[in-house]
Image: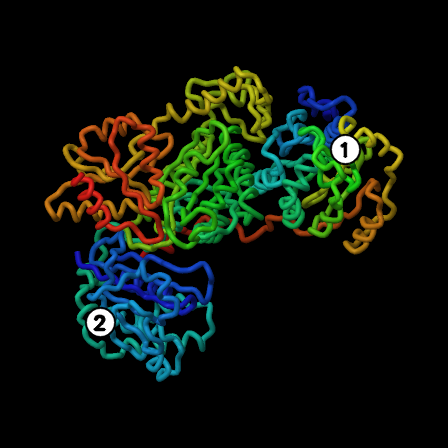
Amino acid sequence: MPLKARDYKSGIKPIWCPGCGHYSVLNAITKAMAARELTSHNTAIVSGIGCSSRLPAYVSSYGFHGVHGRALPLATGLKVARPDLEVVAVGGDGDGFSIGGNHFLHACRRNVDIVYIAMDNEVYGMTKGQASPTSPETWLDGKLTPHGTEVRAFQPCAIALASGAGFIARGYSGDPNGLAQLIFEAMAFPGFAFIQVLSQCVTFVPEQTAWKQRVHPVEGAPETAAEAAALIHADDGFGKGILYRSPRPVWPRPHAQADQTEDPRAGFAL
Amino acid sequence: MTTLTLAISGSGGAGAISTGELLLRLFADVGGYGMLKKTFSPQIRGGESAAILRLGDAPVSTIPAKIDLLIALDWQNFARFAEEVPISASTLVLHTGTDVPPPGVTLDNLLTIDATGIAAAADSGWLNMVFFGMLASGLGCTCAAAEALLLARLARHDQAVLAAACRALRAGFNQALPEPLGELLAGLPVPAAAAPGHSPGPQRWLASGNQMAALGALEAGVRFVAAYPITPASDLLEWLAHHIEHYGGHLVQAEDELAAINMVIGAGFGGVPAMTATSGPGMALMSEAMGLAVASETAAVVVNVMRGGPSTGIPTKSEQSDLNQALYGMHGDAPHIVLAAQSIADCHFTTAWAVHLATQLQTLVIVLSDQSLGQSIQVFDAPGSDCPQAGINRSKEVEPYLRYRDTDSGVSPLALPGEPGRMYTADGLEHGENAIPSPRARDHRMQLEKRWRKLAGWDFGEHWADLVGEMDQHPVIICMGSVSATALEAQAGLAAAGREAAVLSLRLLAPLPAKQLAIMLEPATRLLVVEHNHGAQLWHYLRSLLPQFAFESLALPGPAAIQPRDIYAALETANAT
C-alpha cells in the first residue's frame, strides 16, 4: 500500500515558532515523497545550520545536519558516492546564499542529481533577527543594520540561472500543494534542481504574512536560458512556478567502464 | 656504500628537474639506487628550480648537504636557493659560460661546457639534454637507454621536438668528458646486480611519497576523493585522478577546501571510504568540518602534505610546522587520530592505516606528510600489497537501534543509508544516543566520553612507532616524517664514530601511547626531539604528556633540510651543559 505524506514524518516535534513557514515546507516535502513513492531508507535529507536546517530530523529518512553553509557539498559527496540514493539538500537563505554562496554557484554548475530547497525568509532567525543576503535594502529591523542593509538583495533564481542550473523554481510556504508539485518535479528532474521557497518568518519579519497578497503565478514557460533570464529579471520576486527547466548532462558523466585489470602498481616498478 | 650527490639548477622551465628525473630513472634502471629532491619557486616559469640527486650503489634516503657536482643550466636566480645547494671548494661546478655566476659562488672548481654550442651544432636548443647525455655516458649507461627514457617522457610532443631533443642527447653522450668530470662520474660504480634480467631480492620501485600515499589510499579501499588543488599535495591527487575511476571511484575537484572536506564527510556518511589531501592553509579551512566528522562520528581521512607556514609561507618547500594544527586545531573537545608517515615508502602503509582506522573507529584521521616526503622521488623496495583495509565496524546490532549508543568500546553501531529500520540523522549538534539533538549535560558528557573512549581503548598494535637501535643506556633521537631518514643517517654516522644511539620515529601522534612510550623511554640516557619547525611543536607536545622526562629539543625551520651534522652538534652541545 502506498505511503501517505504523514508516513514520511519522523514524529519528532519541530523547534519552529508557531506560524513559521517551514512547517508547510516540511508538509510539501513529505507530500512530494509520497507522490514519488520514495522509499524512506533510500532517501537522505542533508542540511547546514539555521532554523530550516533542522528539517532532516523531522522526516522519516536518513539525514545529515552538518555545519553552517555546507549542505550542498555534503549532499554532493553523498550523491556522487551513493548514486542509488535520493538526496535532497535543504536550508535557509543565510546558509545557502551567504556563508554557503560559493557552493551554491558551483552546485549549479556541477549539475549533480540532487534537489536543493532553500527556505528563504530574508532573515537570520536562529541568531535572532539579523539581515540576510536576501533582505530588502530598506529593511530597518535587522539587528546589525539599523540603517537597513544598504546592500542590494541577492537574487537566488537569477544567480542560479547564470551559474548553469537546469531546473529553477520558486514556491511559497502559503501554497503547500503548489510547492509539493514543484518538489515532485524537481525530484523527477535529472540534475541539480533548485527551488527558492518564500517561507515566512512571523517572529522577526511579521510583515511577511502579507506575502499571501503578493505572490502570483509566473507568466510564461521559458524554453531558453535567455527567455528565463528575461522572465526572472522582469518578475517582482513573487512569481511562483517553474522559471526554467532544461536538462543537461549530469555529473559525474559516465566514462569508460571500471578496468579492474589496471594495475596501479605497474607505473612504479623499475 | 658509494654515493654521488649532484644538483641540476636552472630558471623555471629550463628543464633542471626533468633532467634530474631522467637521470635517476636511467641509473635506477641499471640497478642503481637514488633519491631526488625538488626545490623550486611557486611560479611556473621565470622562477628558480633545482633537482638535487643522490645516486648510490645501495639504497639512499637522504640528500646530504655536501654537493659533489653542480650543473648550472643557467645562473638566473641561483642566489635564491644557494642555501639549499651549498657549493664548497670540493664541488665541481659545470656551467655553459653564457652567463656568469653570482657573487659568492666558489669558482675554484669551475668547468665551462659549451652546451649551447654543442646543442646548436646538433641543430637543437635542448642544452639540458646535452648534459643528460654527458652524465649518462659518464655513469656507464647506454645512449639507447637514455634515448628511450627521453622519448617516453616527451611522448606527447610532436616528432620534430622529439628528434631535436634526441640529437642534443646524442651530441652530449658523444662528447669526450673533461676531467675531473669523467673521473667523478666513473667513481660511482654501476651496481653489480645490474645485468639485464637479474634482479634478485624484492622488486624495486621509483616513486614519490605523494604517489605512495595515493596508492595506499586506493589499495586500502578509498573510493571517493574530493579536494582543492594546493602545493605540495596536488600531485597526490593527480595520481588518484588517473586511477580511482578504474575502481569505480570518483575524484571531485571541489570549489574550495570547505567543500572538499564536507564532500568527504558526505561520502563517508554513505559508507564509502573517503579522503582529501591538502596542506596547512587548506587544512585550516577544513577545521570546522573536521570537528563535524568527529561529532557526527563519520569516517574521514585528511592527508596534510606540510609546507612552510604560516599563511602562504613557502608553499613549495618542506616543514613540519602543522603538527600543532593537526593536534589542537579544532574547536571543542574533539578527539581524533593523527598519524605521521615515516618515509617515502611508508606513505603507503600510513595512509592505508589511516583509512583502516577512520572506518573502524568512525572518526577523523589526519595523516601528516611533508613536502620532502611527498615530492621527493626515491628508489625503494616495493611495499607489500597486504596493507590495512577500510572496514566499517558495524558493531553489534542491539535493538532498538541507537546510532550513538553508549557501548563499552565507544564504537556505536553504524547504519548506512539504504538500510531499512535504522534511519537516523547524523548531527554536529550534540545529541543523545538516539541521534536527536540534546543540550543536556548528561548526554554531552556521555558522548564526549564515548568519543574519547573509542580511541583511548583501541589497540593500535605495533605500528605506533618504529624503533631502530637499542635504547638501553643510549641516547634516543625522537622524530617523525622526513626527519626520520636524517636521524637514521645520523645514527649510522654516530655508530661509525663508535657511539650508539636509537631512533624512535612516531607514527601515531594522537592519541599518543604515553604509557608505552614511558616504558620504552625509561632506560634511555637522553631524549633528543628533532623536528623541522621553529616552535619545537613535537617537543612541547611530548613534554606536556610525559612531564616526567627531560626531553631535549632540536627544532629547525625549513626550507633547508635538517642534516646529520645538526644532530651531532645538538648531542655535543647538550653534553657540554
- In percent of width and height, residue B4 lies at 22, 62
Mark 2: which secondary structure?
Answer: loop
**Left or right position of A227 against B255:** right
Mark 2 touching mark 1, by CB under 8 A? no
Quarter the C terminus of chain B occupies: top left
Write down the residue under mark 1. Answer: A141
Is B499 located above or below residue A58 in the figure? below
**Left or right position of A116 against B156:** right
* Residue plotted at (25% across, 57% down): B65
Disc 2 residue crowd, few under 14, some 14–19, many 20+, Cα 10 Å: some
Between disc 2 and disc 1, the foreground one is 1
* Residue plotted at (49% across, 40% down): B274
The answer for how far apart the CA atoms under marks 2 and 1 are is 78 Å
Residue B6, visible in the rendered structure: yes
- In percent of width and height, residue B100 lies at 33, 75
- In percent of width and height, residue A124 lies at 70, 33
Q: Quadrant of residue B537?
A: top left
Count all numbered tags in the image, as a single digit. Answer: 2
Mark 1: which secondary structure?
Answer: loop
Q: Chain of mark 1?
A: A
Write down the residue under mark 2. Answer: B109
